[in-house]
Image (tube, rainbow, N blue to C red):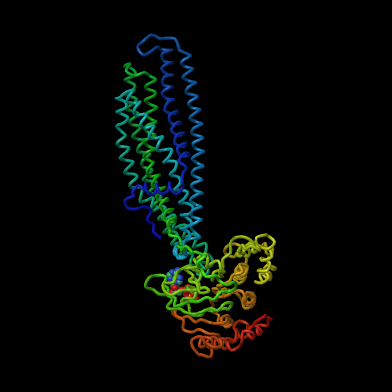
C-alpha cells in the first residue's frame, strides 16, 4: 500500500485538502455562517480596544484635562455610553464565538461520520486481494485516527485563517492611522516572523509524515500481536515482538519529538521578538505621550493592537504545520478511499438464461490463474460438478485448492478459461449474482461478537416466506437442528444466548466450525463451499458435520476442500490437484483402482495408521479406504442416512 500522501507537486497538501472538502461535502452555508460568526466576533474584539481607548481619553480629559490643557469636567454620559457599548460588543462577541464553536464542532463531527460511512461502504467492495495484502492495523488507523486528524483542519481553515487575517490587516491599518512610527516599529518584526514560520513549516512536514506513518505501523503491530498472542507465547517470541515494537516506538517518538520541537521553536522565538518590540514601543510611545503627540487612549490602543497583531501572526505561523498535519492524514484517508472497488459488470438479468431451481451444475473449464503476473497457480483446470453432488478437492499444500474456491466465489477472476454455473459464466452472472447462490465455510472460522444464535441467524437470507419473524425463527431452528449446533449449545452456560467473540471466545475450534457450518446451512445455499471446514474437528464433531451436510445433499452442489482422505472418500467425486493441475478425477473406488497418486497417498496413510498403534485404538480417526462410505460411517458406530 502506498504511503504517498500527496503528489510531489502538492507540497503544501492543498490539493489533498481540496479533495477532503469535496469528500466531506461541507455545507457551504454552514461554513459561511461559521466564518461570518467568527469574523463578527473578531470585529468585536477589534472594536473594544478602540472604544476603551476613547473611554480612557474621556477619563483623562475629565480628570487632568487634555494633555497640555486645563482640567475639564468629566463627560459621564459619553463615558457610560462607551462602557455600555464595549460591554454590549463583548456580549455579542461571546454569543458569536459560542454559536460558531457549536456549529464548527457539529460540522467536524458530521464530516468524521461521513468519512467513516464512506470507509464502511467501501470495505465490503474492495477486492479480497487488497485486504489480504494490507495490515489490518494500518487500515484501522486510516479509518479512525487519520479521519479524526484530517477533519481538524476545518477549524484553522474556516475560523483561524479568516479571523487572523482580518485581525492582522485591521490592526495594521489602525496602527498606521494612529502612529506610523509605532506601526513601523511593530511591523519590523513581521517579515522575520513570516520567514521563521515558512522555515518551520518546511522542516516539520517530513517529520509529520513520518509521525503518521509510524502511528499506522504501530497500530498494525499491536493488532498483529494481539491476534497472535497464543502463538507468540508458544514460540516465546515476545522478545522479537518487543524488538519490533521498540523500533517502531522509537521512530514514532523521534518523529513526534522532531515535529513538535520544530513547530515548538516558533512560538518562543516569536514571543521573544515581541517582547523586544514591546520594549521599544513602550519607550517611543511614552515619549510621544509626554510630548503630546499621542493621547493616552491612543497609546493604549497601540499596545493592545500590537499584542493582537503579534497573536495573529503567531496563529498564522502555526497554521501551516496544523494544515500539513491534517493534509498528511487526509492523504492517508484518500489512499484508502481511492482503493478501486471490485468491478462488477452490469448484469442484465433479463438476458441471462433462466436457471432451473435447485442445485446447479458447475463446470471449471480450462481455468488458469495467478495472483501475480507470470506466476501461475492454476493451469487448465477442468472438471464438472453435477447438480446435487459433492466434489472433494485434495492435493498437497499450496496446490491451489483454496484458490479454486476463491475463483468460484468471484474473489478473483480467472486469467483464462471459465467457470460456469448452469452453463452461464460467473462473470456474466456478476459477483453479487454468483455469491447469492453460495454459502461458504472458510479454513479460518469467523464469528462476530454476539450470541451463538445471532451468528447462526446471520446466515439466514431474506426470502419471501421468511420475511416474518416466525418464519425466520423456524428456519433458524431448522439450521440449528440440521447442523447439530443444539448439541454444542446445550453445554454452553446460556445455550444459544451464549456470547462469543470474533475469535470464538469460549468455543473450541471444532465447536466454532460447527457454528459456521450452521450459519452456512441456515443460508439454504444452492452451492456450498467448504474449505477445510472440518480440519479442527475431532472425529465425532466431524461426523456431526458430515451428517449435517448429508441433509443438504439433495438441494446443494458442494465443493469440499480437504486434506483428510477419509472425508474426501465420502464425496461423489474427487479431484486431485498437484502444482495447480488436475492430475486425477473420479470416485474414491475409481482412483483406488487406478493406482495413481491418490491411491498411493491412501496407502501411505494406511501404513502410517498401521504402524501407529495409538491411531488404531482411536479407530474412528481414519477411514479404511477400501470401505464404502456407508461402511465408514457404520464403523464409526453411528447411524447415518446415506445413499
Ligand atoms: N493472496 C495471495 N497472494 C499471492 N499468492 C497467493 C495468495 N494466496 C495463495 N497464494 C499462493 O497460491 C498458491 C496456492 O495457494 P492455495 O491457498 O490455493 O493452496 P492450497 O492448496 O489451498 O494450500 P493449503 O492446502 O495449504 O490450504 C500458493 O503457492 C500460495 O502461496
Direction from residue 41 to residue 181 in the image, left or right: left
Direction from residue 408 to residue 205 in the image, left or right: left
Q: Name which residue lies at 36% across and 10% down.
A: 69
User: Is residue 166 visible to us here?
Assistant: yes
Image coordinates of residue 117 in percent, x first then y, are: 51, 52
Which residue is at the front of the view, 190 or 339?
339
Q: Farthest residue in the front direction?
A: 350
Q: Please identify the quarter of the rendering in which residue 544 is found.
A: bottom right
As displayed, is residue 609 above or below residue 187?
Answer: below
Q: Quadrant of the C terminus?
A: bottom right
Q: Name which residue lies at 37% across and 25% down.
A: 302
As displayed, is residue 38 above or below residue 257?
Answer: above
Q: Please identify the quarter of the rendering in which residue 199 is found.
A: top left
Image coordinates of residue 159 in percent, x first then y, are: 43, 38
As displayed, is residue 15 above or below residue 51?
Answer: below
Which residue is at the front of the view, 283 or 627?
627
Direction from residue 508 to residue 51 in the image, left or right: left
Which residue is at the front of the view, 607 or 454?
454
Image coordinates of residue 526 in percent, x first then y, are: 58, 71
Q: Name which residue lies at 46% across and 16% down.
A: 79
Q: Quadrant of the N terminus?
A: bottom left
Image coordinates of residue 120 in percent, x first then y, are: 51, 55
Amino acid at each position: 500500500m502506498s504511503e504517498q500522501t500527496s503528489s510531489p507537486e502538492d507540497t503544501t497538501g492543498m490539493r489533498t485538502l481540496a479533495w477532503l472538502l469535496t469528500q466531506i461535502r461541507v455545507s457551504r452555508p454552514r461554513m459561511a455562517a461559521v466564518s461570518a460568526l467568527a469574523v463578527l466576533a473578531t470585529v468585536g474584539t477589534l472594536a473594544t480596544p478602540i472604544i476603551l481607548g476613547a473611554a480612557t481619553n474621556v477619563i483623562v480629559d475629565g480628570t487632568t484635562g487634555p494633555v497640555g490643557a486645563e482640567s475639564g469636567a468629566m463627560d459621564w454620559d459619553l463615558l457610560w455610553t462607551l462602557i455600555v457599548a464595549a460591554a454590549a460588543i463583548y456580549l455579542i462577541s461571546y454569543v458569536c464565538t459560542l454559536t460558531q464553536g457549536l456549529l464548527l464542532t457539529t460540522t467536524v463531527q458530521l464530516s468524521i461520520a461521513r468519512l467513516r460511512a464512506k470507509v464502511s461502504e467501501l470495505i465490503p467492495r474492495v477486492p479480497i486481494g487488497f485486504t489480504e495484502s494490507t495490515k489490518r492495523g494500518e487500515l484501522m488507523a486510516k479509518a479512525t485516527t487519520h479521519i479524526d486528524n484530517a477533519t481538524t483542519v476545518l477549524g484553522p481553515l474556516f475560523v483561524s485563517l479568516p479571523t487572523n487575517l482580518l485581525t492582522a490587516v485591521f490592526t495594521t491599518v489602525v496602527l498606521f492611522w494612529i502612529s506610523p512610527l509605532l506601526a513601523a516599529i511593530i511591523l519590523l518584526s513581521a517579515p522575520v516572523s513570516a520567514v521563521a514560520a515558512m522555515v518551520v513549516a518546511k522542516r516539520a512536514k517530513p517529520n509529520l509524515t513520518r509521525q503518521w506513518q509510524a502511528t499506522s505501523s504501530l497500530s498494525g503491530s499491536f493488532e498483529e500481536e494481539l491476534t497472535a498472542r497464543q502463538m507468540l507465547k508458544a514460540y516465546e517470541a515476545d522478545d522479537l515482538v518487543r524488538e519490533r515494537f521498540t523500533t517502531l516506538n522509537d521512530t514514532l517518538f523521534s518523529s513526534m519529538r522532531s515535529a513538535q520541537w520544530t513547530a515548538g521553536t516558533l512560538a518562543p522565538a516569536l514571543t521573544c521578538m515581541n517582547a523586544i518590540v514591546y520594549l521599544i514601543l513602550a519607550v517611543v510611545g511614552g515619549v510621544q505621550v509626554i510630548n503630546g503627540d499621542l493621547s493616552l487612549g491612543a497609546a493604549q490602543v497601540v499596545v493592545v493592537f500590537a499584542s493582537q497583531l503579534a497573536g495573529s501572526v503567531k496563529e498564522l505561523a502555526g497554521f501551516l504545520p496544523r494544515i500539513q498535519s491534517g493534509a498528511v492524514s487526509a492523504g492517508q484517508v484518500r489512499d484508502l478511499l481511492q482503493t478501486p472497488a471490485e468491478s462488477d459488470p452490469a448484469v442484465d438479468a433479463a438476458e441471462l438464461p433462466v436457471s432451473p431451481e435447485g442445485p446447479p451444475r458447475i463446470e471449471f473449464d480450462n481455468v488458469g490463474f495467478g495472483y501475480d503476473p507470470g506466476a501461475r497457480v492454476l493451469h487448465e483446470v477442468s472438471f464438472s460438478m453435477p447438480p446435487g453432488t459433492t466434489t472433494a478437492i485434495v492435493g498437497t499444500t499450496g496446490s491451489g485448492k483454496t484458490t479454486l474456491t476463491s475463483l468460484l466465489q468471484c474473489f478473483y477472476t480467472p486469467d483464462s478459461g471459465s467457470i460456469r454455473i448452469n452453463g452461464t459464466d460467473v462473470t456474466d452472472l456478476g459477483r453479487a449474482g454468483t455469491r447469492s447462490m453460495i454459502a461458504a465455510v472458510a479454513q479460518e472460522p469467523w464469528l462476530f461478537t454476539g450470541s451463538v444464535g445471532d451468528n447462526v441467524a446471520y446466515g439466514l437470507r431474506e426470502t419471501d416466506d421468511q420475511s416474518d419473524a416466525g418464519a425466520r425463527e423456524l428456519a433458524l431452528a431448522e439450521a440449528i437442528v440440521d447442523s447439530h449446533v443444539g448439541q454444542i449449545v446445550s453445554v454452553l452456560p446460556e445455550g444459544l444466548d451464549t456470547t462469543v467473540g470474533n475469535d470464538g471466545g469460549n468455543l473450541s475450534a471444532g465447536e466454532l466450525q460447527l457454528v459456521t457450518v450452521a450459519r452456512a446451512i441456515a443460508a439454504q445455499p444452492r452451492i456450498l463451499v467448504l474449505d477445510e471446514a472440518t480440519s479442527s474437528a475431532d472425529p465425532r464433531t466431524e461426523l456431526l458435520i458430515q451428517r449435517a451436510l448429508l441433509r443438504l445433499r439433495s438441494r446443494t452442489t458442494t465443493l469440499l476442500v480437504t486434506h483428510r482422505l477419509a472425508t474426501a472418500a465420502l464425496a461423489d467425486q474427487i479431484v486431485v490437484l498437484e502444482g495447480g493441475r488436475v492430475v486425477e478425477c473420479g470416485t474414491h473406488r475409481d482412483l483406488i483402482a487406478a493406482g495413481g497418486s491418490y491411491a498411493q497417498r491412501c496407502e501411505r496413510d494406511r501404513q502410517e495408521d498401521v504402524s501407529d498403534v495409538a491411531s488404531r485404538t482411536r479407530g474412528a480417526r481414519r477411514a479404511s479406504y477400501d470401505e464404502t462410505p456407508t461402511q465408514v460411517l457404520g464403523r464409526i458406530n453411528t447411524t447415518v442416512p446415506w445413499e
